[in-house]
Image (spheres, helix red, strand yellow):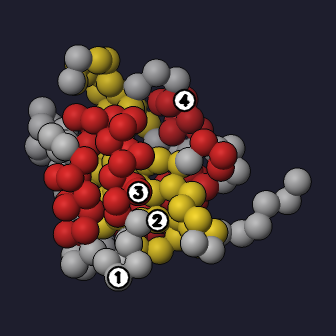
């Protein structure tokens, strides 16, 4: 089946799905978002709409339907404050997984980071996901214990 195309744009305050993103992501990750509540996380997402650089939230949509989102942050891991910037909270709704939305969001963050003049991008992940990111050109740089779980910190060198 050939899926209709989608678009990726910065989260915009006037047409913002910030409440939906906050609810979906906070229910999935809770403290991994870096916030204590859905309300705080939603406030952060809305604040990001005023940023020309970091943070940035990119949203994938097909028409009015939210397909996924990703955050581009200055800081993500409290135990590694020297690392910056970060790709964080990559999220794709269940019905769209495997359809290229996640990869397109990753590519959009990489492009945005390069436009802003960054030379390297970081993320952390766990489970089998380091293999996914490695297949996209990311390389593991450290294994750490973070928020009660083993995590892999990965880097992507920008052209």
The answer to whether 63 is drawn above or below residue 37 in the figure is below
Tag 1: Cα neighbours inside 10 Å, few (<14), some, or many (≥20)? few
Identify the residue shown where x is 21% and y is 24%. Answer: 147
53 or 65: nearer the eye?
Answer: 65
Count of numbered circles on the image: 4
The numbered mark at residue 20 is 3
Instruction: State which tag comes first along the sequence, 2 or 1.
Output: 1
Q: Label 4: which residue?
A: 131
Residue occupying the far bottom of the picture:
14
Tag 4: Cα neighbours inside 10 Å, few (<14), some, or many (≥20)? few
The answer to whether 49 is drawn above or below residue 67 in the figure is below
Which one is closest to the eye, mark 4 or mark 3?
3
Instruction: State which tag comes first along the sequence, 4 or 1.
Output: 1
Q: Label 2: which residue?
A: 59
Which one is closest to the eye, mark 2 or mark 1?
1
Instruction: State which tag comes first along the sequence, 4 or 3.
Output: 3
Q: Quadrant of the N terminus?
A: bottom right
The answer to whether residue 93 is left or right of residue 56 is right
């Amino acid at each position: 089946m050939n899926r209709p195309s989608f678009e990726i744009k910065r989260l915009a305050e006037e047409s913002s799905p910030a409440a939906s993103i906050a609810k979906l992501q906070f229910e999935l990750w809770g403290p991994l978002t870096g916030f204590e509540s859905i309300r705080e996380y939603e406030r952060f997402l809305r604040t990001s709409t005023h940023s020309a650089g970091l943070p940035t939230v990119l949203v994938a949509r097909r028409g009015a339907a939210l397909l996924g989102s990703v955050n581009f942050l200055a800081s993500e891991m409290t135990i590694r404050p020297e690392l910056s910037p970060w790709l964080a909270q990559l999220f794709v709704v269940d019905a769209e997984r495997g359809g290229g939305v996640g990869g397109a969001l990753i590519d959009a963050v990489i492009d945005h980071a390069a436009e802003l003049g960054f030379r390297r991008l970081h993320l952390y992940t766990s489970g089998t996901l380091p293999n996914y990111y490695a297949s996209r050109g990311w390389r593991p740089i450290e294994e750490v214990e973070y928020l009660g779980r083993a995590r892999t910190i990965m880097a992507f060198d920008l052209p």
